[in-house]
Amino acid sequence: MTNSDQPTALDLPMLDPLPEATQKYFDICAEKLGMIPNVLRAYAFDIDKLNAFTTLYNNLMLAESGLSKLEREMIAVVVSAINRCWYCQVAHGAAVRQLSGDPALGEAMVMNWRVARLDARQSAMLGFAEKITRASSEITETDRAGLRDVGFTDRDIWDIANVAGFFNMSNRVASATGMQPNPEYHAQAR
């Protein structure tokens, strides 16, 4: 199996033909990104699941938020690094490199986010995302207060928790299905 043949180790081929709306979405991805991300191809065997995934992803990662797009991608990479999700480390590491203009930041997020040059806000956010990933039942008001102390609102805390939660779920699906990152991600923003 190669990346161009199947996006995962499972034999779940994309619908052919894709529904018109899905094909338009894939065409936009190809135009803007130069590829159709394998995560989308992986879900394209079941359009309802694909639509649910993309709706939640787009809301969490692209909609208005007190978190910047870069901060949300940083959360994605830190959670994915803890979970050792190959697909998301590669794909979202590329996004961190691109959004930050700093290839070293993308690498640090994957390897050990604590060595990156971060401000107090980013450090608190990523520490919270790490705790959600490793021991969510141990989150207390003290953890939330620490985020408020560096300027996060309760809405921001909600967004941090949801982005971290989404990637904990998607990491597990990607790892369990052997999802492969698109080769193009490796060279982006270097």
Image: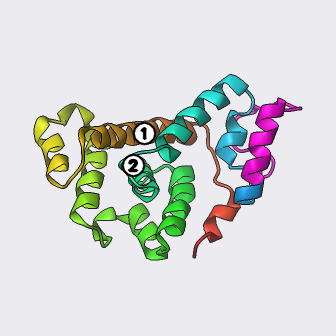
Could you tell me residue 35's position as x and y percent? 74, 55
Q: What segment carries the magenta color?
A: 1-30
Q: Which residue is mark 1?
A: 168
Q: Secondary structure at mark 2?
A: helix
Q: Residues within 10 Å of mark 1 (few under 14, many from 20)?
A: many
Q: Is residue 53 left or right of residue 72?
A: right
Could you tell me which residue is drawn at 44 percent across and 59 percent down? Answer: 70
22 is higher (above) or lower (below) than 73: above
Q: Secondary structure at mark 1?
A: helix
Spatial separation of the CA atoms under disc 1 and disc 2 = 7 Å
Could you tell me residue 177's position as x and y percent? 61, 37
Residue 108 appears in the figure:
yes
Could you tell me which residue is drawn at 55 percent across and 63 percent down? Answer: 94
The quarter of the picture where residue 45 lies is top right
Q: Residues within 10 Å of mark 2 (few under 14, many from 20)?
A: many
Q: Is residue 57 left or right of residue 150?
A: right
112 is higher (above) or lower (below) than 13: below
Q: Residue furthest right?
A: 17
Q: Which residue is mark 2?
A: 79
Q: Residue furthest left?
A: 142
